[in-house]
Image (cartoon, rainbow, N blue to C red):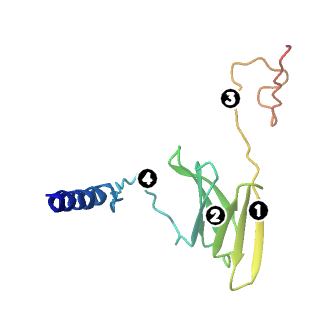
Amino acid sequence: MKRRILKAVIIFSGVMSCLTMPQDVRAGVELKVTQQMELDGQPLDVASSADGKLIFVLVPGEVLVYAISKKKVTNHIPVNKAFNRLGYTARTNTLVLTSSSAKTLKIIKLEWIYSMDVSGLPFRGPADAPVTVAVFSDYQ
């Protein structure tokens, strides 16, 4: 009788240990293309801004700045056609271009220029002035 109970306990322990062991679980990946763009030139390299809002595409002779929210190229940065590698450094907000054939490194500092609509706001001077100075103030 004791042998039967011991045998049952051993079998039960073996079954329970198999049930509590970590199992090999594989998760599936769902892919969804959110945007696609046709390029005029052959893409050589790609980098993304730290916030993920911009994609920099190096093609021969220029860097295309693609704005994801606008779904279009918003800027072209002309570069030497010898550059074939591109990187982005978020900390300094710079593009790093390299050319393996010309053994050259070029660093481009990006400065963002924001346009704002000032139509309908009070202004001083001619409406068609080449420069507009906007003043923001808080009297508190």
The mark that comes first in sequence, 4 or 3, is 4
Where does label 1 land, which residue? 108
Q: Amino acid at mark 4?
A: Gln
Local crowd size for mark 2, using a 10 Å CA cut-off: few (<14), some (14–19), many (≥20): many
Left or right for 116, reference 133: left
Residue 17 coordinates in the image, percent (x, y): 30, 59
The mark that comes first in sequence, 1 or 2, is 2
Secondary structure at badge 4 equals loop
State whether residue 116 is above or below residue 23: above
- The quarter holding residue 11 reads bottom left
Residue 43 coordinates in the image, percent (x, y): 53, 70
The mark that comes first in sequence, 4 or 2, is 4
Secondary structure at badge 2 equals strand
- The quarter holding residue 126 reads top right
Quadrant of the drawing holding the N terminus: bottom left
Left or right for 140, reference 88: right
- Closer to the observer: label 4 or label 3? 4
Q: Amino acid at mark 3?
A: Asp
Which residue is located at x 80 percent, y 37 percent? 130
- Give the camera-side residue of 53 and 62: 53
Q: Are marks 2 and 3 in contact (CB under 8 Å)?
A: no
Q: Are marks 1 and 2 in contact (CB under 8 Å)?
A: yes
| Image disc number at residue 63 | 2
Q: Are marks 4 and 3 in contact (CB under 8 Å)?
A: no
Quadrant of the drawing holding the C terminus: top right
Where does label 4 land, which residue? 35
Where does label 3 land, which residue? 117
The mark that comes first in sequence, 1 or 4, is 4
Q: CA distance from mark 3 to mark 1?
A: 28 Å
